[in-house]
Amino acid sequence: MSNLSEAELIHKFKGISFTTMSSPELLNSLDAFDAREDDVLLVSYPKSGTHWLAGVITKLYNTPVTLTTPIELGDMSKLEELNQLSSKRIIPTHLDYNMLPQHFKNKKCKMIYISRNPKDTAVSMYHYYRENPNLPTVDTWTAFLDLFLEGDVVCGSWFDHFLSWEEHKNDKNILFLFYEDMKRNLPKIVKEISIFLGINASDEDIQDICKQSSFSEMKKDTEKENSDPSHTVCALTSNRKLIFRKGTVGDWKNHFTPKQNLRFDEVFSEKMKFSKMAKHLTY
Ligand code: A3P
């Protein structure tokens, strides 16, 4: 937990909370990002399995993620950093669709969006807030859940984020994935990703990638690589120990009281009433 005040850690841009590590100048210049047609975007709301997906993609390409923090993190030097990267650029972001730099849309860059049951996402984010000195202090799970449901957390409302991307789920350049599907049948999803990216991966390659991408293997790698920030695609920490916590589906059941669950379900039903994918997100 941090000794800095909330105002020193968080600022709002277009109504969405960002840490002060994302400078307003950079956020204002997002549309100046110069996309390349072969850029691949790895998109998620925080705590949805970003690192897991990044692990799979980098193993498929056999190359590390080229940009190790999301495009929206940093100051104006981020633009220069991006320009200097050689192709192929694998670029993480937590931006919602509306804030995504226009060039990526115009050039129809490939984008992979990973989503996760918001109850588990909230729990994961709560623990992340608790452990991370770059985020405001949250005293209790109950207090955090209030903030999550109000969308008053870093990267804004989970619901708005999901819905902004769901509108584009059938775009040819976007692959929509769910954390829970990766848990259920990783080889099937890795195959799907390889086809989407146009990578020729044999069944044996896919088996290998799945083995190396299991929670226990990735966590073990973390212990070796913890001092190397190039292995994280996280906005807020270079300490990978904070990323690999439990890696399960349904941990929310260990946190939510029946009353909190009821309230969450009410908010979920209201916010997601036009969503065609709501049933994929309730476990
Ligand atoms: P938990 O906190 O529920 O354990 P992100 O990478 O977007 O920050 O997401 C982190 C979440 O993904 C954490 O969830 C983490 O444990 C989980 N995760 C990371 N690697 C995983 C893997 N190989 N298999 C399953 N879950 C994984």
Image (tube, rainbow, N blue to C red):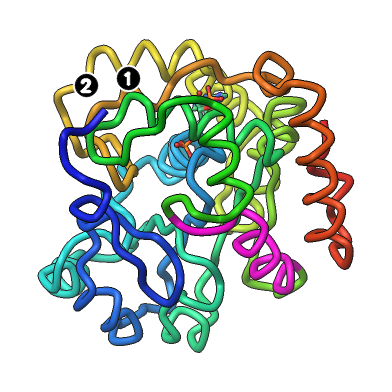
- Residue 200 is situated, as x and y percent measured from the top left of the image, at 58, 48
Q: Quadrant of residue 120?
A: top right
Which residue is denoted by mark 1 in the rendering?
241
In the rendered image, the quadrant that contains the N terminus is: top left
The residue sitting at 36% across, 79% down in the picture is 35
The kind of secondary structure element at disc 2 is loop
Is residue 232 or residue 134 the one in the foreground? 134
The residue sitting at 44% across, 66% down in the picture is 16
Q: Is residue 160 magenta?
A: yes
In the rendered image, the quadrant that contains the C terminus is: top right
Q: Is residue 39 above or below residue 54?
A: below
Numbered marks: total = 2
Is residue 262 visible to the viewer in this orientation of the structure? yes
- Residue 82 is situated, as x and y percent measured from the top left of the image, at 21, 68
Which residue is denoted by mark 2 in the rendering?
226
Amino acid type of the residue that numbered disc 2 sits on in the rendered structure: Asn
Q: On the picture, is 132 further left or further right than 227?
A: right
Asked if the beta carbon under badge 1 is closer than 8 A to the nearest atom of ligand 1, the reply is no
Dot 1 surroundings within 10 Å: few (below 14), some, or many (20 or more)? some
Is residue 67 visible to the viewer in this orientation of the structure? no
The CA span between labels 2 and 1 is 7 Å
The residue sitting at 66% across, 19% down in the picture is 251
Q: Quadrant of residue 167?
A: bottom right
Is residue 257 or residue 158 the one in the foreground? 257
- Residue 76 is situated, as x and y percent measured from the top left of the image, at 14, 73
Region in magenta: 155-169
Amino acid type of the residue that numbered disc 1 sits on in the rendered structure: Lys
Q: Is residue 225 magenta?
A: no
